[in-house]
Image (cartoon, coloured by chain):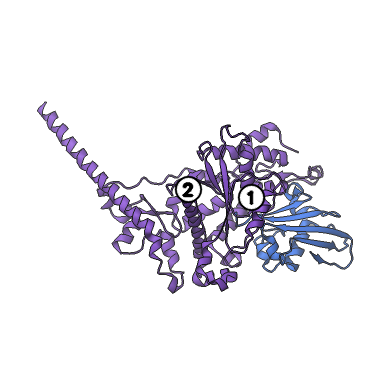
Chain colours: A blue, B purple
Amino acid sequence: EQKLEASTNTMSLKIHFQGGLELLFNNETQISLDMPSSPSPFTLSDLISLLSTKCTKQKELFLDTAQKEKTTVRPGVLVLVNDTDWDLLGAEEYEIQQSDDIVFISTLHGG
Amino acid sequence: HTMTQQQHDSCGCKDDGDQAPPQIQKKEYENVEKGTFRGRHGEALNLSDLLKYTNKVFKKTLSKCELEHGEKVLVCYSGGLSSTALLHMVHSAIPLEKRRRGYFTWDVLFIDVNGNMNKDELEQNLREQPRGYGFEKFFYEKSVLLDLVKEEESDNLKQVLSHKIKEPSALEDFVRGSIEKQIIRFAKSHEFRKVLVGSSANRLAIRVLGDVSKGRGTSIPLMISDCDQRHKSVDICRPLKQFLNKELAFFVYLNKLQIVHQDEPVTMKPVKTHSIDRLIETFIEGLQREFPGTVHTILRTCEKLKSPQPVVSKDQLEQNASDLSGKTQILCPLCNNLVSRSELKHSVENDEKILCYGCKRNLQYYAEEERNLSEDLFEEVRAERTALSRSEMRDMLKDVLLDSANEDSCQSGDEK
């Protein structure tokens, strides 16, 4: 299990990768993340940006690089927060809470 | 926020092809039930809703496969989301009592693409799934792709294949065609008449647009059919064709099913320089995210296409190639798609190997030493050609007999 550290620990998250996405994150199916303290909310968009810059080798396989207006995952990658579809929670604008369990599942290729 | 029964009953039939789902406001999502996902019409579905829906739609699609009571069926399993969901749904669909309508037995086939999986572990994982799947036998085979590389190179399957076939589209087509042929061969040798595959709606939509762009449009009606009978003694059934990838992913996740990821034997490249199918996948998935009816609109449109009737008369054979839009019963030995009549005529006239248009184009991307395809590949093609010649002859005789009958009736009419 890989751990990403930030300057000051305030919130801890568990992030899971499934459906082949783990290949983009050094074959790690689970990452623990300590979020930096900040007055502004830390959204899923911020998390995706963080993951794409720090963990993935080919970020266009995770990040939707065609999207200029917002930072989001590539189409075909599903995101769940506490077993719930992020589409029901505001998608990229969802503000991450303490101990949130976040899962990224790729439905691309394969079968 | 869970759907009403009325909404649920209709959700499997309708698709709002052109409308994006409404945006969820923050106040709304504070009350969202845990373990729910957004359905194709924007409604929130929980596991119970999902199970009812999948059960209903799966049984309906399965019934179109015309399985006989007590028949033995082969279910293909790759470890991915779709085929994992397929196993679970098959198990749920079979009645517990053998005498009940819809009862059949099933075996599982796993093809290990890279040759590095453990057969016993795979079987044990399946047997230990939450409901204990009731399949009889678990068959494991290493993919035929491994026969193309030396044993010491088997860990570098990707690199070896990419040297043999440089262009990603051609390589993907070759890999897919080889594995499909392996499945068919296995089914025939073990006397399975029906093979169930986990092709989701997304996968099929990508496949049809991809094959259209590669000149294989003739086979589209077969490709999206519930029961594909192009292989004669073996039918390929697609009971998941109504399900979106998202629905299958949630089905697997919420049911806590374990998936097994197999690394694809095609080198990972950035999407823009990858294969035609990957580009189309990006295109369709992007549209689907904004307009959830996209995939089903593509499939519904394709279902309106019909393959042209086989050419049956000598006169049609003598027409110019550009007029010949009929299909033959000959399958391309590389990709298993139908070879059009014009391609067949062109190949015969120019003494070329009989391949579909798409595979002929792909050959130019094969390494020089790989372009001489083995004669064994064309054995079935030769058999089909001989059979076709006999049916052509029968039709020619039929035309002659009809002409004679017309002459006789004219003469008798004149006499009257």
- Residue bearing mark 2: B191
Q: Nearer the viewer, residue B156 or B238?
A: B156
Quarter occupied by residue A22:
bottom right
* Residue B316 in the image, given as x and y percentages of width and height: 28, 49
Q: Nearer the viewer, residue B395 or B246?
A: B395
Q: Quadrant location of the N terminus of chain B?
A: top right
- Residue bearing mark 1: B84
* Residue B18 in the image, given as x and y percentages of width and height: 60, 45
* Label number found at residue B25: none
* Amino acid type indicated by mark 1: Thr
Q: Looking at the image, which residue is at 29% across and 55% down?
A: B320
Decide if residue B13 is in sight here: no
Residue furthest to the left: B415
Q: Is residue B249 left or right of residue B201?
A: right
Q: Is residue B399 left or right of residue B306?
A: left
Q: Earlier in the sequence, mark 2 or mark 1?
A: 1
